[in-house]
Amino acid sequence: MKNELAKVFEKDLKKLKEEIESYEESDLFKTATGITNSAGNLAMHLVGNLKHFIGAVLGNSGYIRNREFEFAGQISQAALLTEIEETQIIVRETLAKITAQNLDQNYPVRVFGDDMTSGFFLIHLLGHLNYHMGQINYHRRLIKNF
């Protein structure tokens, strides 16, 4: 299961990078009526989420998350692409170190108020990644038509 999870995270983070590369830098942090989050902020949120929940919690990377900045800050497109690449490495290296037994153990942090296995939470993180990637794809197409 961990190899499959690693492959899907790798594929989806590559797709996130491609989405961000598809933007004109001037459009990356734009919003539109009814759209409160820009693609840049959603991508920053995804990077922060994965670096925290996979890198810091499972991999003891020492990463300190700044969730507020994920939604309010701005960085250059090049810096965001570097952040995505770093996230790919962190996720790949962390998943390579965990065992099948780790996946069946409780995730070290109670996230939703209930215990859950690490495997369950990694599946949740994949769903979260894809949910926001869909928003980013929609945002890119919406912004191009403005």
Image (cartoon, rainbow, N blue to C red):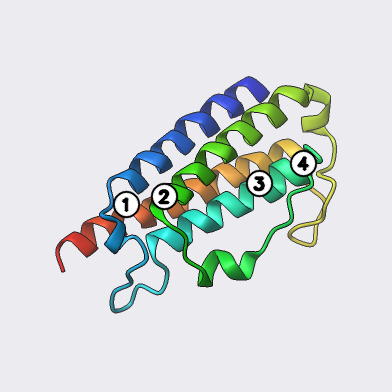
According to the image, label 4 marks what residue? 61
**Of all residues shown, which one is farthest toward the left?**
145
- In this view, the residue in front, 125 or 96, is 96
Q: Secondary structure at mark 2?
A: helix
Q: Is residue 39 left or right of residue 86?
A: left
Residue that mark 2 sits on: 133
Crowding at label 1, few (<14), some or many (≥20) Cα neighbours within 10 Å?
some
Residue 45's disc is none
Image location of residue 102, percent across then percent down: 82, 30
* Res 1 seen here: no
Element marked by disc 1: helix
Q: Which residue is mark 3?
A: 51
In the rendered image, the residue lying farthest to the bottom is 33
Earlier along the polypeptide chain: callout 1 or callout 4? 4
**Mark 3 residue element:** helix
Give how far apart the Cα atoms at labels 2 and 4 are.
25 Å
